Image: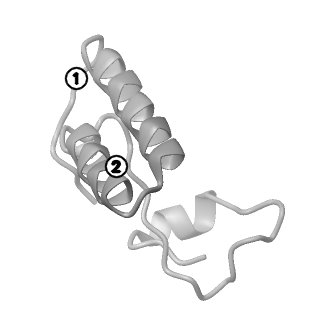
Amino acid sequence: MKFTRDDYNRRIVDLEGKIPEDEPVFLLRAQDKHAPETLRFYAKLLMEEGNVTMAEELLNHARNMIVWQKSVKVKSPDK
């Protein structure tokens, strides 16, 4: 898998080998102030196509990020 950040390419691994080595992937961290809203938007797209279960999982994850953000410093992403 290929991340947008080279340091992620060296540190984050797919131990089960389910993601092809050349597949671009993107990681959102809860410290990113935009992450919860991004997940909510993606959940909206999933709802529109009828994937309610995954949309609900994403909305729950977004809520967990917001709770976590209240106890730490959030920021814009950096490299």
2 with respect to 39 (left or right): right
Question: Image height check: is 26 above or below 58?
Answer: below
Point out residue 70 in the picture as x, y percentages from the top left corner: 24, 14
Q: Is residue 17 left or right of residue 44?
A: right
Asked if the residue at tag 1 contacts the one at tag 2, i.e. Cβ–Cβ closer than 8 Å, the answer is: no
Disc 2 residue type (three-letter): Ala
Which residue is painted at 46% across and 46% down in the image?
Answer: 52
The residue that label 2 is drawn on is 43
Amino acid of disc 1: Lys
Crowdedness near tag 1: few (<14), some (14–19) or many (≥20) residues, C-alpha within 10 Å: few
Quadrant into which the C terminus falls: bottom left
Residue at 62% across, 58% down: 12
Q: Earlier in the sequence, mark 2 or mark 1?
A: 2
Residue furthest to the left in view is 76
**Secondary structure type for disc 2:** helix
Q: Is residue 76 above or below residue 17?
A: above
Q: Which residue is denoted by mark 1 in the rendering?
A: 73
Mark-to-mark CA distance, 2 and 1: 25 Å
User: Quadrant of the rendered structure where residue 30 is?
Assistant: top left
Residue 36 placement (x, y as % from top left): 27, 38
Of circles 2 and 1, which is in front?
A: 2
